[in-house]
């Protein structure tokens, strides 16, 4: 059976178009245009690119967007003042402070300062708790994007054995919660797991998010599995910079039913799900 290389860009474009149609209908009914605010501290090249892509997708979906740029030397209070102002704006439904922040700024304080109802990253402790209890509506964007991919690729996930490699607060833990809510049997593999590869060999769905270049090879993968590679790592190959995932794509490829490439897999869906969260926040507001 031919392997399906999952086109995250195509799925993202489809999701953005679906949301654009919904926004258009809602505004015709007199609802307020959804608003997304992004705060960027400093001029990190990768963060600048991420912010530009997020704003472009927001505009494609019919959202109103604003970007606040602060100097890398800004104080904690200056950043908090910006967040507090955005918390109070009625035209802003979603707030995203681009991470990572410069070392002298507290990411934890900023995450906790954003109103849970505007926390479109899904990182606020209130939203984390709601997700754990099955009540969340604002869910971390990368796990939500992975779930969108899986549902569109596989349909009903009930009864599938899903293995999540990695237990971070941003991806691993929320991903495991989402898969449980989708009625999968879920295992979480991490750095202290004994014989991680053997555990992964049992997976119908394998989600890898550890930040280790090409860690997972064919010996970790069950024939016919669906593999979701969340990692994105910059490596050097023949003197050239190359982006690779946490999965050795070329080695694993022919054992899979489907697999996400890096780049062009999970990344575009993460951004689309940020827009989805903003629309959800606007509807709840």
Image: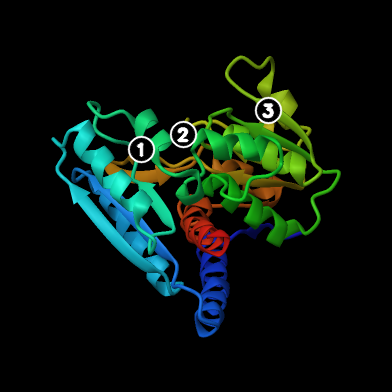
39 on left or right of 169: left
Q: Position of residue 118 (x, y in %)?
A: 46, 51
Q: Residue at x 64, y 56 (%)?
A: 148
Q: Cα distance, mark 2 to mark 1?
A: 8 Å
Q: Cα distance, mark 3 to mark 1?
A: 27 Å
Q: Nearer the viewer, mark 2 or mark 3?
A: 3
* 255, 17: nearer the viewer: 17
Circle 2/circle 1 CB separation < 8 Å:
yes
Which residue is labeled 2 in the image?
Answer: 213
- Reading the chain from its start, which is encountered first: label 3 or label 1? 3
Q: Position of residue 61 (x, y in %)?
A: 46, 72
Whether 105 is drawn above or below 149: the answer is above
- Mark 3: which secondary structure? strand
- Mark 1: which secondary structure? strand
Which residue is labeled 1 in the image?
Answer: 235
- Reading the chain from its start, which is encountered first: label 2 or label 1? 2
Q: Residue at x 17, y 33 (%)?
A: 75
Circle 3/circle 1 CB separation < 8 Å:
no
Q: Cα distance, mark 2 to mark 3?
A: 19 Å
Q: Which mark is residue 269?
A: none
In this view, the residue farthest toward the bottom is 28
264 on left or right of 137: left
Q: Position of residue 74 (x, y in %)?
A: 15, 37
Q: Callout 1: few (<14), some (14-19), or many (20+) C-alpha neighbours within 10 Å?
A: few
Q: Position of residue 155 (x, y in %)?
A: 77, 59
User: On the image, which quarter does residue 94 sit in?
Assistant: bottom left
In this view, the residue farthest toward the right is 159
Note whether residue 258 is visible.
Answer: yes
* 223, 80: nearer the viewer: 80
Q: Residue at x 58, y 36 (%)?
A: 128
Which residue is labeled 3 in the image?
Answer: 188
């Amino acid at each position: 059976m031919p392997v399906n290389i999952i086109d995250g860009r195509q799925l993202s474009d489809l999701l953005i178009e679906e949301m654009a149609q919904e926004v258009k209908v809602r505004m015709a009914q007199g609802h307020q245009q959804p608003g997304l605010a992004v705060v960027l501290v400093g001029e990190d090249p990768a963060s600048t690119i991420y912010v530009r892509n997020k704003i472009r997708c927001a505009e494609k979906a019919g959202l109103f967007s604003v970007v606040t740029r602060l100097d890398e030397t800004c104080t904690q209070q200056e950043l908090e003042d910006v967040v507090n102002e955005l918390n109070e704006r009625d035209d802003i439904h979603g707030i995203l402070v681009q991470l990572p922040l410069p070392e002298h700024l507290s990411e934890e304080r900023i995450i906790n300062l954003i109103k849970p109802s505007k926390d479109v990253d899904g990182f606020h402790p209130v939203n984390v708790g709601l997700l754990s209890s099955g009540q969340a509506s604002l869910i971390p964007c990368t796990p939500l994007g992975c779930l969108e991919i899986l549902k569109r690729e596989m349909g009903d996930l009930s009864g599938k054995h899903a293995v999540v490699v990695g237990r971070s607060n941003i991806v691993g833990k929320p991903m495991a919660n989402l898969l449980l809510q989708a009625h999968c049997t879920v295992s979480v593999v991490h750095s202290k797991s004994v014989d991680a590869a053997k555990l992964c060999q049992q997976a119908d769905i394998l989600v890898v998010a550890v930040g280790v270049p090409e860690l997972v090879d064919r010996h970790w993968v069950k024939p016919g599995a669906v593999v979701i590679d969340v990692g994105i790592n910059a490596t050097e190959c023949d003197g050239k910079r190359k982006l690779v995932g946490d999965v050795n794509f070329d080695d694993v490829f022919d054992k899979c039913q489907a697999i996400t490439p890096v780049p062009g897999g999970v990344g575009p869906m993460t951004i689309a799900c940020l827009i989805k969260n903003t629309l959800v926040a606007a509807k709840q507001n």
